[in-house]
Image: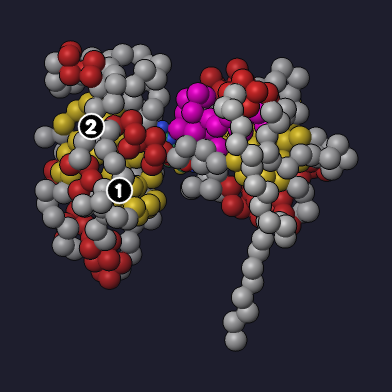
Amino acid sequence: MWTLLRVRASESPMPRSKPVEPNPAAFLQQEATAPRASEATGFVSLIGAGPGCPDLITIRGLRALQRAQVILFDALLDPAYQEFFPAQAQTLAVGKRCGQASVGQADIHQLMIEHARAGRRVVRLKGGDPLVFGRGGEEAEALEAADVPFEVIPGVSALLAGAAGAGFPLTHRAVSRRITILEGHHLPDSAAAWRDLAASSGTLAVYMGTRTLQSLAQGLLEHGAAPDLPVALVEQAQCPGQTSTFSTLAHAAAGALHPVTAGPGILFIGESLNHRFHPTSEVPHEPAAPVSGSHREARARGGRRERRAS
Ligand code: SAH
């Protein structure tokens, strides 16, 4: 027998907001709408830092960061974020660096809990979004189990940064009504799972997949995906040195698609990649010579590097 459990944020109806004149300056001065820490108990904010450039953190995330007394940040996060840390905050790099955990997950939980119990405002700053392949869910569960008040502030995940940076939609009403997010370290382990994946029309976004991309492409082809399906590998999305390499599933399966930077990369596969556009964004980054195309084309792409794997 099923019991319907309704969880409501509040029992009272949502207050109607009055129409107000837009006033961005006043908005920036407001306190965040997130729950406030009581001085006695402390509080933890799990914050999504975005894809690697500090200007893509949310305003809410930045406000929480600037109020922090303790900051536990991902060791891999760009040092540029540290400019926004309050001078008096105690800071510690945690998580993985070069595949080695500098501070293990259980210790991260412990640190957050102990600092919050000592009455401090703690920020746990994580790359992208905390709840997408970021163990933010485990951290939230640990805080909840310890009765520590916390919030989760979302961040721009690599999936969103990659599509916006390289210039294609993730959904498209004609060709993609679904996004499938995969982790490249764990490819399907049965013929049925491969067939499902190959048949899933829509856009595939593969995190942590630069090492396994050839096996993924081969598996998809063997289980019925179209050889001319477009594939894009977007590296350092929305960051200096962003590079996008466009190819096809057949080329990727043949080993012709490789990462070309040492930075993180996300792989996309699907028809929506055929609906490309060329953003002329002014996101600060070092203009780089295009690997292919004229200077004019490169300027139209905002100076970003773009390649076609052959
Ligand atoms: N929580 C993060 C993902 C962490 S897993 C998020 O929401 O984005 C780390 C993987 O994310 C990397 O291996 C890579 O696949 C992807 N990634 C993170 N930042 C990226 C970036 N700027 N460009 C491309 N891929 C990125």
Residue at 19% across, 28% down:
307
Task: Determine the CA span between mark 1 and mark 2.
Answer: 14 Å
Q: Is residue 7 left or right of residue 219?
A: right
SS state under label 2: loop
Location of residue 74 in the rendering, given as x and y in whole percent from the top left corner: 57, 34
Is any atom of residue 144 visible in this view?
A: yes
Picture quadrant of ligand 1 = top left
Q: Circle 1 sits in a helix, a strand or a loop, which is it?
A: loop
Q: Which residues are magenta?
A: 48-65
Which residue is the site of mark 2?
277
Residue 149 located left or right of residue 268:
right
Write the residue at 53% across / 48% down. 131
* Quarter of the rendering occupied by the N terminus: bottom right
Q: Earlier in the sequence, mark 1 or mark 2?
A: 1
The label shown at residue 171 is 1
Q: Position of residue 259 (x, y in %)?
A: 28, 33
Give residue 271's position: percent from left, percent from top: 20, 48
Whether the residue carrying mark 2 lies under 8 Å from ligand 1 is answered with: no
Residue 24: quadrant of the picture: top right
The part of the image, by quadrant, that contains residue 31 is: top right
Q: Is residue 167 left or right of residue 155?
A: left
Q: How is the image coloured?
A: secondary structure
Q: In the picture shown, does residue 182 fall above or below 42?
A: below
Q: Residues within 10 Å of mark 2 (few under 14, many from 20)?
A: few
Q: Is residue 71 magenta?
A: no
- Quarter of the image holding residue 154? top right
What amino acid is labelled 1 in the image?
Thr
